[in-house]
Image: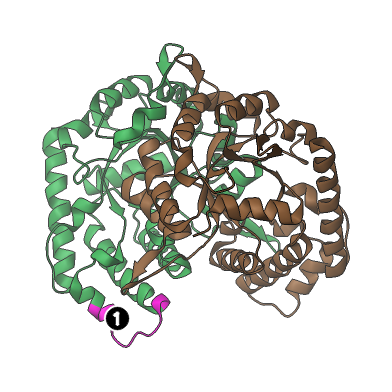
Chain colours: A brown, B green
Amino acid sequence: MTTFADHLQASIEKTSSALIAGCDPVIEKFPAFLLEEASAKTKSDDDFIDRALSMFCETFLAAVVGRVAAVKPNIAFFEQYGLAGLSVFKRFCEHARAAGVPVIIDAKRGDIGSTAAAYSSAFIGGTKVRGHSFVPFECDALTINPFLGFDTLEPFVTDCERTGKGLFILLQTSNPGAKDIQGLECGGKTVSGHIADWLATNASRLEGASGWSGLGAVVGASYPDEARALRKLLPTTFFLMPGFGAQGAAADDAVAGFGVQNGKRGGALVNVSRGLLEGASTSVEELKAVIVANTDKFNGQLRAALS
Amino acid sequence: MTTFADHLQASIEKTSSALIAGCDPVIEKFPAFLLEEASAKTKSDDDFIDRALSMFCETFLAAVVGRVAAVKPNIAFFEQYGLAGLSVFKRFCEHARAAGVPVIIDAKRGDIGSTAAAYSSAFIGGTKVRGHSFVPFECDALTINPFLGFDTLEPFVTDCERTGKGLFILLQTSNPGAKDIQGLECGGKTVSGHIADWLATNASRLEGASGWSGLGAVVGASYPDEARALRKLLPTTFFLMPGFGAQGAAADDAVAGFGVQNGKRGGALVNVSRGLLEGASTSVEELKAVIVANTDKFNGQLRAALS
């Protein structure tokens, strides 16, 4: 069984990229040509949503395959379009995985006991029906929220130990209010510090042959000092770093979260979402070219900062 | 515009019940008769899931309508069955609301900025498509997770101010590890205490004519001392209290979270989920009778503890 950590590390090496492409579609902001094409001869909203989201997601995927280490669809942006949106979400994850791109589903799920187990079934472990098991929204790794306590993370970790998949625990998020709770000082360390202790204790459970652990953490690029401190506590943990691009963090900030294994910098994925879409387009080909150009630009910035 | 707080208060008075019925379906645990009926002439898993979940949910709803103040479907238990499960989830919420029962969707969502806004669109505020707006998974109130910071709660609260819907913020959960993070002491108060301060400051934003606020909080019945302390800090906040029944808390524990308005005890919903299903059945009628009998039993215990 290949672990998520090794699958991801191989993808980083193959693409020479530590970039992860966030897919957060907002139909209202799609280019006019795409909305017109999706609307033509379409009567129902669900049909329109399916056509618009599918066209966008397929173009997005075609643009980033081979250029980024992984993709990160955020399920919120699909859930807001109801069942039609979630149907495209499922297909997007399947198509990306079929193309060999690791898929990290950004769902930030968290609940207690059997409910946490149900979420883990949905994305990682699989649900039993009529004597067999299936994973309805299968991914390579999932983001989860630790606020309810460390016992609530166990169903996810146990499923990952069995299936070889990975997790990214929210540790230090990238938003302005991140420190309201995560930054509170309790007994000589922050709330994030307490979570980091748990991550350090459990890192080996999802460690790959590469030395990196797939029991990862979300660490915002917008707080480079905190990222540096967390990296010291978690030398082998894969960091998923949002905040690059539209959220204001520069490539140099993101680099603060990188670690070192076998003499090489690594162990971090830097996310860019909205920044990939900046630019006008009047056809599918142009939209793809915009995303390719932005991906290359961010890859260039990140490679320069890392070298 | 009727606020959620007043809608819920009216339902509590109409049903003479502070019970909320949690709907957490696990197909593998359904009675044999139901599985056989759902399986008959069914080829696809999705068809089986739709039939089994629909039969269960319709029976559940028929049993609890008029007997409980509200219903609380937990979306995790439907998400684990994929699109087929979420389709039944959507219908369950619609049917319950059509029957006049307030629906609290337990989704524990939380994310930052525009992603939090997307989650709020999905459940509360509505999504814009082709010039109009629709709420794909409409509810009367939603549970949300505050771990990412108070700025991340704003899109939800703002949508509730506009639509009259409500929220339950995770404050003190009912699981064994709840205190790992929520119970950490920071500057003379716990993490939960810091969240309670925010809730106290903002309670008036979703306050109804009844005096109760629909900016509610999840407070586990399994920690009665904490519930009593939080009630002192939050005299008008609606509490959603899990932990009653299968999770081990007694009616007396739950009562610790109740407040007083106009000389009457109130301001809390006590959740029971698995406990409603205890008992054998060999037909839809018997399954309904089991749920009715359990509902009446828990209502009796709660009324006795409150009187």
Residue B45 in the magenta stretch? The answer is yes
In-image side of A249 versus B296 (left or right)? right
Q: Residue B244, located in which quarter of the rendered image? A: top left
**Residue type indicated by callout 1:** Ser
What are the residue bounds of the magenta stretch? B36-46
Kindly identify the residue that appears in the image at 49 percent across and 58 percent down. B137
The C terminus of chain B - image quarter: top left
Percent coordinates x, y for residue A111 in the rendering: 39, 44
Percent coordinates x, y for residue A75 in the rendering: 57, 55
Percent coordinates x, y for residue A237 in the rendering: 56, 38
- Label 1: how many Cα within 10 Å (few below 14, some 14–19, many 20+): some
Percent coordinates x, y for residue B264 in the rendering: 24, 29
Kindly identify the residue that appears in the image at 70 percent across and 61 percent down. B131
- Closer to the camera, B172 or B294? B172
In-image side of A27 versus B164 (left or right)? right
Chain letter for mark 1: B
In-image side of B30 versus B8 (left or right)? left
